[in-house]
Image (cartoon, rainbow, N blue to C red):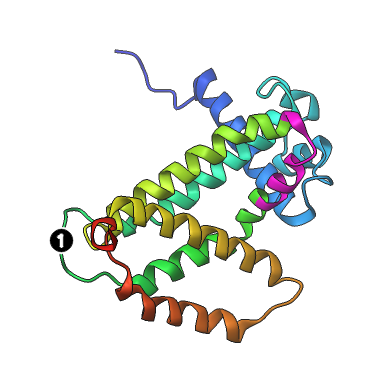
Amino acid sequence: MTAVTGRRTQAERSAATRAALVDATIETIAEIGYHNASLGEISRRAGISKGAIFRHFDSRTELVVAAADEVSHRHIEAVQILRRTEATDQPIDLADIMLRVRGQIRDKTNTVWFELLVAARTEPELRERLEPVARALLDAVEELAVAALTPMVSPETAKLLATSLIHMFDGEAIFRSTYPRPELEDSRIERLVAVFPQVRTDSELG
């Protein structure tokens, strides 16, 4: 019988190092911004030598995109509770859904997305690498919205509502650090919930 030593395999050590680097990248960008997030600072926070980074990531761009991907996975996992296990005509708590989505967008780690989206505007390589990650995130958000909102609304309407809320709350999160308007933010969800019963399926709108 082979004794269990408790020692990690090379693959496990590599995975742990990658995870530490990604976590450090998220922390660094969230705290000091994308352009200040040097590989030296990231390696210091991760407790890993700067040279060792390139044994796990080909470039700084690959590392920051991996960080964006991790942030997106965390957000989707956090709101999976919104998924309905089966179709039902019972009313949903739309205010709760919107508050959960808003909370995730305001989470400190989501700053990574804001930083990278702005940087990608003028960095072609980052833009190209980030596009499939952004697409996968929005696809997942739309799929979750369909699961949560149908049959109350059509799948097409559910997707439109989801992306519209994401864009609205993104704008809120960005502006609130410079020009906070909490009274407007509080009333916004109340008013959206009030008008939601007016939304009908596409066929009813015909």
Residue in the foreground of this view, choosing between 112 and 16: 112
Query: Residue 135: where, in percent of width, then height?
Result: 52, 38
89 vs 135, left or right, is: left
Query: Residue 41: where, in percent of width, then height?
Result: 81, 42
169 vs 153, left or right, is: right
**Residue ranking furthest to the front:** 206
Query: Residue 200: where, in percent of width, then height?
Result: 28, 65
Q: Residue at x 58, y 24 (%)?
A: 14
Q: Residue at x 64, y 49 (%)?
A: 113
Query: Which quadrant of the rendered structure holds the N terminus?
Result: top left
48 vs 16, left or right, is: right
State which region is magenta.
114-125
Q: Residue at x 30, y 75 (%)?
A: 197
Is 121 covered by the magenta stretch?
A: yes
Is 116 above or below relative to 157?
A: above
- The residue carrying mark 1 is 88
**Residue ranking furthest to the top:** 1
Is 164 covered by the magenta stretch?
A: no
Q: Secondary structure at mark 1?
A: loop
Query: Which quadrant of the rendered structure holds the C terminus?
Result: bottom left
**Residue ranking furthest to the bottom:** 183
Is 204 above or below relative to 9?
A: below
Q: Quadrant of residue 89?
A: bottom left
For the residue marked with disc 1, what is the amino acid?
Answer: Thr
35 vs 48, left or right, is: right
Residue in the foreground of this view, choosing between 60 and 143: 143
Is 119 above or below relative to 97?
A: above
Residue in the foreground of this view, choosing between 112 and 150: 150
